[in-house]
Structure formats: C-alpha cells, structure tokens
Image: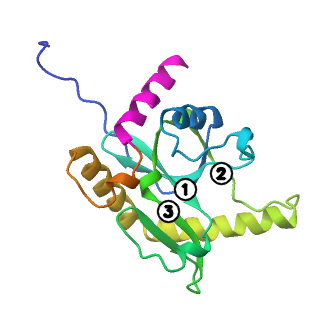
Amino acid sequence: MNNTSKEKKPKIKQERLALYTIDMKYIRNLHKKDDRVRSVSPQIGKASRAFLGIIVICDEHKYCIPLSHPKPKHTDMKGTIDFTKIFDEKGKLIGVLDFNMMIPVTDAQLRKLDIAIHPSDTPEIKHYKKLCQREINWCQKNSTDIINKANVLYNLYKSGDPFQARARCLDFQKLEEVCRKYNAQK
C-alpha cells in the first residue's frame, strides 16, 4: 500500500434510536472545553441530572442529541433546524430535542437507559419510564427526520458558512477533539 492512499474508516451503522445516558466524567471534560455543554456538576446542584439523549451518526461520529423536559418557553417556540418538539399520541408536548447541543460520543461513554417497568420500581420511577417510553416511541417514528436534521445542522456548521443557528451550536469539531483525547487516555 502506498503512503498517499488513505485508509478508510469503517462506516458506522445508524442503529435504531434509543435513550442513553452519558458518562458524567466525560460530560465534565466537554463542559470544561465549552461551558454551554449541559453541566452535570455537583457545584451547581446538577449532580443528579443525567445527560439523556438519542444517538445519531454524523459523518463518522456518533452524536448524542440531548432530550429535555419541556419548559413554558417551548410552548410557543417553532421547530427550527436546531430544535424539535416531541409530542405524545394526544398531541401534548412531552419533550424537546436540542440539536444545537448535541455532543460527540463513543460507545465507551454510553449506557443504554433501562425504560422497562419493573415490579420494584417506585411510582415516580414508573411515571418517568412511561414518559421516556412515549418520548422514544415518538423519536423512533420520526427517526428519518431526526437523523436528517442532525446531519444537515452538523454539515452546515462544519462548512463554516454562516447560518442563523450557528451561534447557538456547540463547536462540534472542537468537541470531537476532546472526545478523541478522552478516549486515547482511557
């Protein structure tokens, strides 16, 4: 093999959308590089907040799109290139996806969320798992749109061209470098 040819990385396969939590230490490393990454810091009372999201493939990277509970401000917001509302089967707003806050991840940082209801679950845990089930069902039904939206945003950002949502986006390329370094240390 000559030195001018590049080895092709194996293409990452897009899996069926599921909910994942992300390693807290990794989130803290990302947050140090870009303080807009959702913090899980105990110093600001966020130690119990899980970084929860769905995984999509953008180029050769896995990205976690954070899933959040809706806030009153989300009610009147329109869907944009970097924001999508999640509705239940009755049309009630139950969650939001913040594409501009998606972070690069590898399997080493991921833990699939168990949303199966178990007899030992408390009523609060059962309620939370039912909500998560409704959210992931919506995401799976709309997976093509979600994956396409993530890739359009990622490619627009990576191109360097100006667009309206650029200032709201994390610096994907800078965070990819943090991801590479974090995994190299492990």
Q: Which residue is mark 3?
A: 97
Badge 3 density bin: few <14, some 14–19, many ≥20, Cα 10 Å: many
Give the quarter of the image for residue 142. Answer: bottom left
Q: Marks 1 and 2: in contact by CB < 8 Å?
A: yes
Please provide the residue range marked out in magenta. Answer: 171-186
Q: Label 2 vs label 1: CA separation?
A: 8 Å
Q: Label 2 vs label 3: CA separation?
A: 17 Å
Comparing marks 3 and 1, which lies closer to the viewer?
A: 3
User: Mark 2: which secondary structure?
Assistant: loop
Q: What residue sits 46% from the left and 50% below the top?
A: 102
Q: Marks 1 and 3: in contact by CB < 8 Å?
A: no
Q: Which residue is mark 2?
A: 113
Magenta span main SS: helix
Instruction: Please tell me which residue lies in front, 185 or 141.
Output: 185
| Image vertical order of residue 32 relative to residue 155, above or below | above
The amino acid on which the numbered mark 2 sits, given as a three-letter code, is Leu
Q: Label 3 vs label 1: CA separation?
A: 13 Å
Percent coordinates x, y for residue 139 in the rendering: 49, 66
Q: Which residue is mark 1?
A: 18
